[in-house]
Image (cartoon, helix red, strand yellow):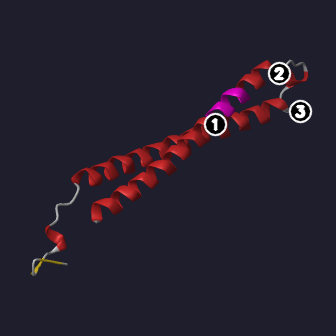
C-alpha cells in the first residue's frame, strides 16, 4: 500500500502481544480442562463398574437383601463425576476456540 508515494511495509506494524499471551493461557486452560475431564470420566467409569459388580446378587450375597442405598449413592457420585467431566470437556473446547482465534489475531 502506498501513502504519499511511499511504500509501507506491513511487517512494521506492531503485533498485538496480548493476543499471543491470551492464546498461550487458553491453550494451558484447554490442556488442564481436558486432563480433568478425562480424570472425571475415569471416576465415573470406576463407580459404574463397582456398582455393576455389587448390584448382581450372584456376585454378592448382601445384594440380595437390599435396599440399595449404598449403590445409589455410588452411582450418584459417579453421575456427578460424569457431568463434571462433560463440563470440563466443554470448557476445553471453548478454550481451544479462543486460543485459535487469539493466535490468528496475533499473526495478523
Left or right: 87 as drawn, with respect to 22: right
Could you tell me if the residues under marks 2 and 3 are in contact, i.e. CB atoms within 8 Å?
no
Could you tell me which residue is drawn at 39 percent across and 54 percent down?
99
Question: Seen in the image, is 48 located left or right of residue 25?
Answer: right
Mark 3–mark 1 distance (CA, rounded to whole Å):
31 Å
C-alpha gap between disc 2 and disc 3: 15 Å
Mark nearer the viewer, 2 or 3: 2
Residue matched to label 3: 58
Percent position (x, y) of residue 108?
Answer: 28, 66
**40 left or right of 48?**
left
Q: Position of residue 96 (x, y in %)?
A: 45, 53
Instruction: Tell me what residue is drawn at x 19 percent, y 78 percent.
Output: 1
**Marked residue nearer the N-terminal end (3 or 1):** 3
Image mark for residue 68: 2
Residue plotted at (83% across, 27% down): 60
Q: Which is closer to the viewer, label 3 or label 1?
A: 1
Which stretch did the figure color magenta?
A: 75-82
- Above or below, 86 against 27 in this view is above
The x and y percentages for residue 26 are 38, 48
Q: Pointer 3 and pointer 1: residues touching (CB < 8 Å)?
A: no
Q: Is residue 79 magenta?
A: yes
- Which circle's residue, 2 or 3, is located before the other in the chain? 3
Amino acid at each position: 500500500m502506498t501513502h504519499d508515494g511511499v511504500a509501507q511495509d506491513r511487517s512494521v506494524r506492531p503485533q498485538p502481544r496480548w493476543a499471543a499471551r491470551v492464546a498461550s493461557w487458553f491453550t494451558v486452560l484447554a490442556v488442564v480442562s481436558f486432563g480433568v475431564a478425562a480424570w472425571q470420566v475415569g471416576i465415573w467409569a470406576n463407580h459404574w463398574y463397582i456398582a455393576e459388580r455389587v448390584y448382581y446378587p450372584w456376585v454378592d450375597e448382601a445384594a440380595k437383601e437390599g435396599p440399595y442405598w449404598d449403590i445409589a449413592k455410588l452411582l450418584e457420585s459417579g453421575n456427578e463425576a460424569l457431568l463434571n467431566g462433560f463440563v470440563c470437556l466443554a470448557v476445553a473446547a471453548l478454550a481451544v476456540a479462543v486460543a485459535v482465534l487469539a493466535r490468528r489475531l496475533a499473526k495478523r
